[in-house]
Image (cartoon, rainbow, N blue to C red):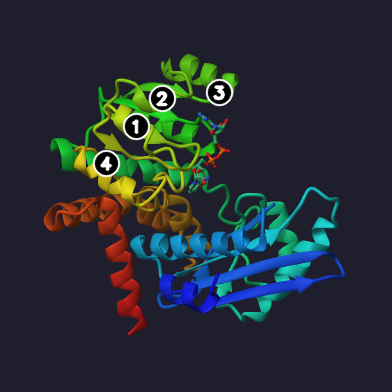
Amino acid sequence: MEPFRTLAALGHEQLVLCSDPTCGYRGIIAVHSTALGPAVGGTRWWHYPSDEAAIVDALRLSRGMSFKNALAELPLGGGKSVILGGPEAVDRAAILRAHGRFVDRLGGSYITAEDVGTSPADMEFIAETTRFVAGLAGVSGDPSPHTARGVLRAMEAAARHRWGSSDLRGRRVAVQGLGNVGMNLAKLLAAAGARLVVSDIDRAKVERAVRELDATEAEPERIHAVEAEIYAPCALGAVLNDDTIPELRAQLIVGGANNQLSEPRHGRELAARGVTYVPDYVANAGGVSYGGSIEVLALKPEEALARVDRIFETTIMVLDRAAQEKIPPSDAADRIAIDRIARASR
Ligand SMILES: NC(=O)c1ccc[n+]([C@@H]2O[C@H](COP(=O)([O-])OP(=O)(O)OC[C@H]3O[C@@H](n4cnc5c(N)ncnc54)[C@H](O)[C@@H]3O)[C@@H](O)[C@H]2O)c1
């Protein structure tokens, strides 16, 4: 890797390598952009195959946060940090405190929160050494219901764009993954009168949705291909790939999962097949919109919910721009984000 060339290519401001051998801490903080405000993004604790893989992940994720926050019209930039963890026993609290010290040295240009591999309880340790941490237990709470609400708004907007009505009554929706986001989304869809087909590798969750939400069940490896008008990926990333795209039957894809496209070219592939794909970071911004509104902007809960609901208008704007410029929505969203960040930088 040529670090400066990589930073320039992706538009990053700063990459910090952090180390504290006294507790075995090794961390990376990537600040993509502070043009719109402090760079906000979680701390991922993960076992990476190499240092380079960890750096690439931090760079990619921090850029994704910039784009998500820019599209959500939050006065926030994008950052992300990773803690390189292995299977060995470690003093978790000491590592998190060390991480907090490095976050603190950035003086507020980066604000962290939980992510894959860290929890609200972990944020309490980080908060012992920095005040630049969000997502503490009992402040803005679990983001998942707000993420699900935002996905529903994006789905309603895509329905209006495609079919002329945002009403989801009677529409058949395939929900992949019934975790924190997927189950909340399934409940909202059932309340809106949609017909559900669901999958999860956890039998108990599927049985609950069948029992309580009148859902039908699909095999986890076939959910993308079922007869449904809308496909909502809410589990894993990279579910839109060379194998699944030819088998899709849905006209709309709108879900909560991060990084749904295996590669950027798959966004173009979907558009070429006439499938309307709402970019994941547009649809799943409800959690960060709510949390950012409460914890960074100090808005009231009802004002924060109104910001989540703006995902409807944002989705319409992205789909309109894609149609006008004859480009896939994934490219349209990236262009809008890049424009907003560039304008703020000037
Ligand atoms: N929680 C949030 O607020 C939030 C915000 C933005 C993005 N996301 C993204 O949304 C996705 C879901 O997040 P979550 O918080 O609901 O996670 P979660 O761990 O609570 O749920 C994931 C669910 O997917 C299921 N699953 C795993 N593999 C599967 C497979 N092959 N087929 C079907 N189901 C499978 C799991 O059993 C689990 O029930 C993730 O990609 C996450 O990064 C979440």
Which residue is disc 1 drawn over?
Answer: 231
Task: Name the residue type under label 3.
Answer: Lys
The answer to whether the residue bearing label 4 lies less than 8 angstroms from the nearest atom of ligand 1 is no
Q: Determine which of the numbered discs, if any, sits on residue 46 in the image.
A: none
Q: Residue at x 79, y 48 (%)?
A: 87
Count neighbours of disc 2 (C-alpha within 10 A) and say few if under 14, some if 14 to 19, many if 20 or more: many
Residue type at tag 4: Leu
Question: Of the residues shown, which amino acid type is indicated by label 1?
Answer: Tyr
- Residue 245, given in percent of the width and then of the height, sits at 33, 34
Q: Secondary structure at mark 2?
A: helix
Which label's residue is closer to the chain start, 4 or 1?
Answer: 1
CB at disc 3 and ligand 1 closer than 8 Å: yes
Mark on residue 223? 2
The residue at 18%/57% (across/down) is: 321
Q: Are marks 4 and 1 in contact (CB under 8 Å)?
A: no
Q: Tell me, yes or no, whether the two marked residues, 1 and 2, touch with CB atoms within 8 Å.
A: yes
Which residue does the numbered mark 3 point to in the structure image?
205
Q: Which residue is mark 4?
A: 270
